[in-house]
Image (cartoon, helix red, strand yellow):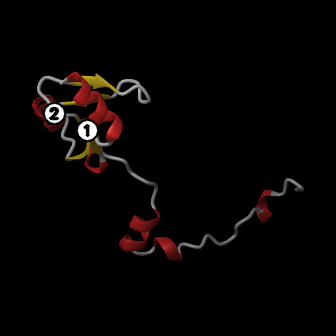
Amino acid sequence: MTGNSTNSFPKIRMRRMRRDEFSRRLMRETQLTVDSLIYPMFVVEGRKQRQAVASMPGIERVSVDELLRECESLIRLRIPAIALFPVTGWPYRRRRLRSE
């Protein structure tokens, strides 16, 4: 560059993509709000159960009664949705059968 500011690029700024509100909404930066959140909950059978998930530090599997308590706090935080993931699979059932 020669440092000549009179020939700076661009001379014409194309604004065709920003003319309509619809187009501006499509192309604007992503906005993340609490309305966009879905809270994952891992559910286990029983009552008063809280089990740490070894592969996810800070995450617990909870029983339905504990899940209801968690949902009350989510309501206060205004998180609009949860995704439930029940414990399934043979290793879990085998451990459960052994303990009964």
* Residue that extends furthest to the right in the rendered view of this protein: 2
* Residue plotted at (29% across, 28% down): 95
Q: Is 17 displayed left or right of 3 in the figure?
A: left
* Three-letter code, disc 1: Met
Which quadrant, please, contains the N terminus?
bottom right
User: In this figure, which residue is indicated by the disc labeled 1?
Assistant: 41
- Position of 89 with respect to 50 (left or right) is right
Three-letter code for the amino acid on which mark 2 is drawn: Leu
* x, y percent for residue 79: 22, 42
Vertical position of residue 20 compared to residue 67: above or below: below
Q: Which residue is mark 2?
A: 67
Instruction: Tell me, for residue 59, which label it has, or none.
Output: none
Q: Nearer the viewer, residue 54 or 41?
A: 54
Instruction: Write down the quadrant of residue 88 in the picture.
Output: top left
Q: Quadrant of residue 28?
A: bottom left
Distance between the alpha carbons at the discs numbered 2 and 1: 8 Å
Numbered disc 1: secondary structure: strand
**Residue appearing at x 39%, y 65% in the figure:** 25
**Residue 22 percent across, percent down from the top left:** 37, 72
Q: Is residue 26 above or below residue 79?
A: below
Mark 2, secondary structure of its residue: helix
Q: Residue 43: where, in percent of width, then height?
A: 22, 37
